[in-house]
Image (cartoon, rainbow, N blue to C red):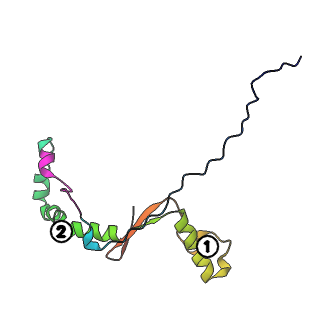
């Protein structure tokens, strides 16, 4: 026995919604325009206040100069060098890198990243270099 209803049949069809897209933003700034607000990387006073007085261990080993250096402009300069030269390495960067390799050597078409001599892409990274040393976070 067939029944009729005024309710239309529901469909399992879902609306196609465009995926979330991250748009690139490029900033151009001079190195010394970047203002860095730093705290003490290791705040011995705060640690002692909270019951963890470790200053004496570092003083006994003669390492306090290292921690003092971190609070000087050396640390700020390293941070400034990193962020001014930073770039995002993502899927688009990977495709561009592969395309450039193929343009230089067309025989690489269809090969894996390893066969092209490129590092495997694992995840999105922020890449920079400090004093010629590559740094990825």
Image side of residue 50 versus residue 91, left or right:
left
Look at the numbered disc 1 and give the secondary structure of its residue: helix
The label nearer to you, 2 versus 1, is: 2
Dot placed on the residue nearer the N-terminal end, 2 or 1: 2
Of residues 64 and 22, the one nearer the viewer is 22
Disc 2 to disc 1, how far (Cα)? 43 Å
When the figure is inspected, residue 11 is found, relative to residue 95, above or below; the finding is above
Q: Position of residue 69 (x, y in %)?
A: 16, 66
Q: Residue placed at 33% from the left, 67% from the top?
A: 83
Q: Is 94 positioned to the left or the right of 36 in the image?
A: right
Above/below status of 58 relative to 117: above
Q: Which residues are magenta?
A: 36-48
* Residue at the (62%, 47%) spot, across then down: 17
Outermost residue, bottom side = 104
The residue pinned by badge 2 equals 73
- Is residue 120 in view from this perspective? no
Residue on which the image places disc 1: 115
| Secondary structure state at the residue bearing disc 2 | helix
The single residue placed furthest to the front in the displayed view is 6
Q: What percent of the width, then of the height, locates residue 60?
A: 10, 57
- Viewed as shown, does residue 24 lie left or right of 11? left
* Figure check: 37 above or below 119: above
- Asked if the residue at tag 1 contacts the one at tag 2, i.e. Cβ–Cβ closer than 8 Å, the answer is no
What secondary structure predominates along the stretch shown in magenta? Answer: loop
Residue found at x 17% / y 64%: 66
């Amino acid at each position: 026995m067939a029944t009729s209803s005024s309710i239309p049949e529901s469909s399992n069809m879902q609306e196609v919604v465009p995926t979330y897209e991250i748009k690139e933003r490029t900033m151009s700034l001079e190195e010394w325009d970047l203002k860095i607000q730093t705290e003490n990387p290791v705040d011995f006073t705060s640690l002692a206040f909270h019951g963890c007085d470790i200053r004496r261990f570092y003083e006994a080993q003669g390492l306090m100069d290292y921690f003092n250096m971190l609070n000087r402009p050396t640390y700020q300069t390293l941070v400034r060098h990193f962020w001014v030269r930073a770039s995002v390495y993502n899927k688009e960067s990977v495709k561009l890198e592969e395309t450039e390799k193929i343009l230089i050597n067309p025989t690489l078409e269809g090969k894996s990243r390893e066969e092209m001599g490129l590092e495997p892409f694992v995840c999105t990274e922020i890449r920079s270099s400090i004093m010629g040393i590559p740094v990825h976070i």
